[in-house]
Amino acid sequence: MTALPAVRQLVFLAADLPDTLARARQELGLGRGVQDAEGMAALGFIHEVLTIRDTFLEFSAPLGPDTMPGRLVAKRGNLGYMVVVQVEDIEALQARAGRLDLKPVFQTPYEGHTITQWHPRDFGTLVEFDQIRPASSWHMAPRIFDNACTDVVGDITAIELAVADPVGCCARWAAVLDVPVQPDGQSLDLSGRSVHFIAERDGRTGLVGVSLPATDRSRAGHTFELSGVRFRLT
């Protein structure tokens, strides 16, 4: 990675992890992923992270029905759960957020990096802003890069977030990340990866759409739903 901030990882939550992973591999051509089984179990999840090249798709499921993710899936069904954005300076980001009376709900060191998570009420989805050291690395490196595959798709190019106030939410992201709002007033360019804010539809909020370039050009234009999120190959 050479430019920040950038969308690096998307997290999805579904009732059935094996089925979701099988579908992801079939549709996206991705290989075996990596896990932090112990760390995620402590939070009530099972998971696997699949690598494209420099961006990552994490598929997760509840460890049991009485866990936080179990109750969330029972209430909302399969869903896009979190967006992870890599930033250059987490302290500067927190200072900008503080001027808007925003603060993280969770902050912790992980493998020498700094992880912060922020409330969906403020950002339209659970969002994680992470400072990575060195910036070219990522969580669970180097093994997370070992099974990277771009046979079918390339790295994430755009995501859609369904929110109650697209203009206001976009402005809040822009202020915290210190990036300009695009001319449409409802999108940001994060180092070539777009974040589009759209009005919520049919009660679905948060991460609802993902676009990826089809490196297998026969797949260009293909759309499908996975873990409650619409994927589009461009």
Image (cartoon, rainbow, N blue to C red):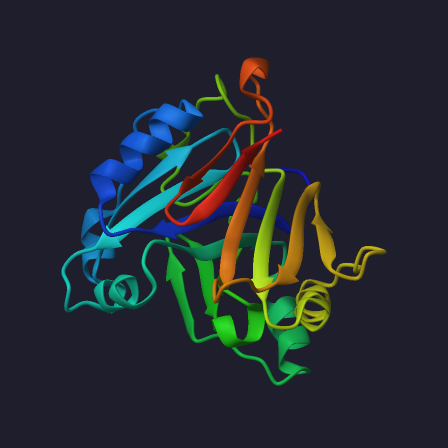
At 79% from the left and 60% from the top, the residue drawn is: 181
Question: Between 4 and 82, which is closer to the camera in this rendering?
Answer: 82
- Tell me: 49 left or right of 157: left
Residue in front for this viewpoint, 221 or 105 = 221
Left or right for 109, reference 75: right
Q: Quadrant of the N terminus?
A: top right
Q: Quadrant of residue 32?
A: top left
Residue at x 55% of width, y 38% of height: 136
- Assign the C terminus to one quadrant of the image: top right
Vertical arrangement, residue 144 with respect to residue 95, above or below = above
Please say if 151 is above or below 66. above
> Where is residue 126 shown, x and y percent of the image?
46, 65
Vertical placement of 144 versus 91: above or below? above
Q: Residue furthest right?
A: 183
Count all numbered tags in the image, as a single digit: 0
For residue 3, which quarter of the picture?
top right
Out of 177 and 124, give the one closest to the viewer. Answer: 124
